[in-house]
Structure formats: structure tokens, C-alpha cells
Amino acid sequence: MDKNKTSVSQYLLYRLQEFGSKHMFGVCGDFLLGFINQIYKSPVTMINCCNELNAGYAADGYARINGLGAVTTTFTVGELSAINAIAGSYAEQVPVVMIAGSPELRHARANKMLHHTLGDYSIAREMFRKITVACERLDDPLHAPQQIDMALSRCLYYKKPIYFELPADMVTAKCAKPGKFLSIVKTSNPDALAEALSESLHLLKQAKKPIIILGMEIIRHGLQDIVKKFIEKSGFPYCTFVTGKTTLSEDHPQFIGCYKGGWSREYVAEVVDSSDCILLLGGFFIDSDTGGFTAHLEKSKLIQANFEQTNIKNHTYSEIMLSDYIKGLTKAVSAGKLPSGLIPAKTALKDQSKVKVTSGKKLTVKHFFKRVASFLNEEDIVIAEVGDCLYSMAGTLLPKNTTFISQSFYNSIGYTVGAALGTSFSKKRRTILFVGDGSFQLTAQEISTMLRYDLKPIIFLLNNQGYAIERAIHDGPYNDLQPWRYHLIPQALGGEAGINVHTEGELESALKVAENAKKLTFIEINVDKYDFGDTLRLAGSAMAESSKNSYD
Ligand SMILES: Cc1ncc(C[n+]2csc(CCOP(=O)(O)OP(=O)(O)O)c2C)c(N)n1
Ligand SMILES: [Mg+2]
């Protein structure tokens, strides 16, 4: 073989692992077998999942920790199962590479009515085009390296998913070996940047009570160090949206808590609502970040800096890179252009350390989340599913260097089980999953994959006998579930039975087991059907209000 050549599939796999994706999640199929064989011959490890949706979720969770995730499926039937996961990655700005193995090109050219094809070979690909930043069919080995590099550079720059269709006969087709990878680099328009900085500094200088809010883009674009430097130099207090939770370690002395509009803790709401200059870095006005749009973030006092543009009050500066903008502010503070240490911030309350335990007492949602907060360790990866798990965990102060993961914008339930599979490959960190019974019923089978690959997440399943969040909006029989014996599921899937917890005492014993566990730990937390956390109750009323015209 020509030493300067490789195959299209090996080229792709080389690039994936180069940028952090050392595992590939997926489900095989006849059009994909050749590619999967190549994965087994490459440095990338294939993780065979139970279904494609979960594989997509796993790739998303994996990408949030490792910088890039990848999922592979067979043509149409497999990829359309994964499409909801890719849509979630698009909404939540997560760099995931989706690879669909398709029939050999000769079949496509002859438009043969092969199984899985819908009669039109382009339909699935065109569906992905809307939810990716690059959508490529690798049908020419000469151009494939360029297509792969261009798409990947967009994925890594925008932190959004990309899609490749890989026809079966292209898997081993020869192409050039990977050369130097060219990343997308954009620079700010210097005049626009200078003007935006000057206007921002004017507002910040006049402010008596400035506050910083961090949204999702800071984590996604890896700007934590830059932001930390600015926060520390300025001395301004800061909070995060839910989508920005754990952007910086939550033990930071200037951190006052998670801001959720009208659903925030009193002190956080008071600081933000009474601020005369709000500096929103990397955030958007998402309902779950603004307490169902109850936030008082008035434009007259708002500076909103996003990835490629900054809005100040009612006008927009485009072509400004967020990193340049934050660095510019930091430089101004260092040069004494901004007063620093304006407000002595009251650090986020740590009221969760002492919890009174009464052995035989029935467990409540409030007791569980308060108690489990002190079970969490530094460096843990904490994943919370939409529902009471997310609402309760968002308000929990997390230990140093914890990473919080949730699909709090796209809200596709079941996401966290797949995501926990993906994060569990970070062997040095514990993955702690909090998932509701309703959500779990969508993606439960992926526990099987965790067992298959000897992964050791700690899973808390909140069994409140149904869809509590939906009950809080509008109740009916559709919010009830078939009552599964959740703690027995790991056993049915080839592992050992989990622990069933009903009382405060049983929770203590279960946490001891979990602390010393050398294998996957599954703990079913049983609470009353109408036992809702405070934020869930508030969220329920807000959502009921927003759909009130649909109920009679
Ligand atoms: C894929 C998908 N299907 C349906 C919904 C609507 N939905 C949102 S939350 C929810 C119920 C979640 O129940 P559970 O996981 O038990 O959490 P709880 O509210 O009980 O804490 C449903 C059905 C959704 N968000 N995503
Ligand atoms: Mg539930």
C-alpha cells in the first residue's frame, strides 16, 4: 500500500481521536459492519449500545467531558432513532459527530429499493442538515479528507453537531493521510470591540451594584479561565444560569448561587433584581434559565456578551468574539479603569451540611436532596434529569470542581441515562446520576451497556410514581406509570439488584454502600406521589400559565 495513503474510515477515526473522541457509541447494521470492523482496528474503542437514541445521548455526555463525542448508526432506521439526540446536542451546543453507514454507491446510483432506504437515499441526510453545522456525504475519496476536516473544524468552532454519511464502499477507499488540521480562527473587528468595551466600561464604572451572570457558552467554548480571571480582578459577585451551573467551581468566594428568575433563592434574586448593571456572559433568555421568563433582566441595565456578538441595552455589536471581549474587560480592570471589589459578595449558602436523620421516617424529596448534597465529592460528575431531579439539584451547592450536566434547555427526558453512560468512561471521576422514574422508562436499557463495559456510575432513581412535573402543570391519568420494580432492573440486565429505599435510615445505609462500591450502584428512592420540591411546584405553575389556553 502507498505509504502516503490511508482509508476514508481510518482518516475519520484518526481525526476523531485526535480531538478527544476515543470511544464511539452506536449500534451495528449491515451497511455499517465494514466501518465498525475498521473501528476495532483503530485506536477508537467501539461501545455497542442497546439503541441509537441512547448512543446519541452517550456521545453528547461524553463530549461534554472530553471535548468531542461520536455516534455511528446504520442507514435511516438507525440514524432516525438518533436524530432526537443530535437535535439535543444542537440546541445545547455540544460537539458530536454523527456517522451513518449507508449502502454502496452503486445501489444509490441505481436507486435500488434496498431495505431501510425510503426509496430516496437522501431523505435522512437532509433531515440532519437542519440540526448540524455541516452535513456531508463522503462519496469521493479524493475529497473526503477535505470534507472531514472542514466539517470537523465547524463542529469544534461552533460546538455543534456534524453529520457524515459514509457509503459502505467508501470505508476502505484510499485517500490522503491526515496532514496539519486547520482550525477556524475568527478575530474581532477591532473598532467594534473597542467601542463595545468603552461603552461597557462606562456603564460598569457608574454601577453601584454590578452583577455577572454566566450562561452556557462559557463552558462550551472553554472560556472558564478567562472568565475566572476577570471575575477575580473585578471582585464583582457572580451567579450562573442553570445552563451555566459549575462553569467555575461553586466554592468560589464570589459565587452567590444559581439565578433562576423568580425561582431563585431569595438572596440571589435580591442581588440580581437590585443590580444596576447586569453583565450576562455567554447566556440566552431560555425559559428554564429565567424561571419561566420571570427574570427581571431589563435591557436598560443589561450587557449581554455572546460568542460572536455583544448587545448593550438596545443595540448590537457584531463581529466581537466573547473571549476578546472578556479579556478586554480584564485588561481594563488591571489598568484601574474599573473599580474592583465593589460588593462584598455573600457566598452561596452552604446550609446542606447538617441534616437530621430519623431512622424509620418516610423519605421526602426535600430530605433526600438535602442529605445527598453532602454525599457528593469534589470532582464528581453530577447529572440531573429534567423533573424534580433537575429542579432540586440546580439549587444545590456542589463541591469543588464538580461538573454539572443536564439537558436543561432541550429537555428531552431519558437523556441522562445515555449521558451517564458517556461520562462514565472518565474513570478517575465518579458519575452520579439523578433520574426520575418517568424519564428512566424511556432509556432504561442502557444500564445494560454500563454493566457490559464494567462502568461504575452511582444512580439515584427518584420514584414518585409518575410524571410529577406534568402533574404540577395539569394532572390526569396520563401522568401515572406502570409501576416497575426499578431496583431489580440491573439484575434483569445481567448485574446485581439495586437498593430499595423508603426511609431516612435506609438512605443512610444505601449511601454507605454507594460510598464504598466497586461496581455500578443503583438506588431506588421512593417518595409520595404528590411530594414535589419547591422549585418544581413553581415551575409547574409557570408552565400551566404558559399553556393555559389548551385546558378546558
Ligand atoms: C422525550 C420527551 N418526551 C416527553 C416529554 C414531556 N415530559 C417532560 S417532563 C416529563 C415527566 C418526567 O417524569 P419523571 O422523570 O418521573 O420526573 P418527575 O417530574 O416525576 O420528577 C415528561 C413526560 C419530554 N420532555 N421529553
Ligand atoms: Mg417521576
Image (cartoon, rainbow, N blue to C red):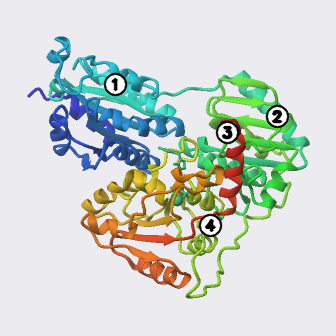
The number of numbered badges drawn on the structure is 4
Q: Tell me where residue 122 sits by quadrant.
A: top left
Q: CA distance from mark 4 to mark 3?
A: 23 Å
In percent of width and height, residue 78 lies at: 29, 36
The Cα atoms of the two marked residues, 1 and 3, are separated by 32 Å
Q: Which residue is mark 4?
A: 531
Compared across the picture, whether 326 is left or right of 52 comes to right
Which of marks 2 and 3 precedes in the sequence? Answer: 2
User: Any mark on residue 124, and which?
Assistant: 1
Label disc, if present, on residue 299 of the rendered structure: 2
Q: Quadrant of the N terminus?
A: top left
Front residue of 297 and 487: 487
In the depicted structure, whether residue 345 falls above or below residue 64? below
Residue at image location 72% in from the left, 52% down from the top: 259
214 shown above or below 378: above
Q: CB of mark 4 within 8 Å of CB of mark 2? A: no
Q: Nearer the viewer, mark 4 or mark 2?
A: 4
**Residue nearer the viewer, 228 or 430:** 430
Instruction: Specify which label sits upstream in the sequence, 1 or 3.
Output: 1
Residue lying farthest to the left in this orientation: 1
Q: Is residue 430 left or right of residue 188?
A: left
Q: Is residue 301 visible?
A: yes
Task: Provide the residue designation for mark 3.
Answer: 547
**Disc 2 residue type?**
Lys
Q: Earlier in the sequence, mark 1 or mark 4?
A: 1
Amino acid type, callout 4: Asp
| Residue 280 placement: quadrant | top right
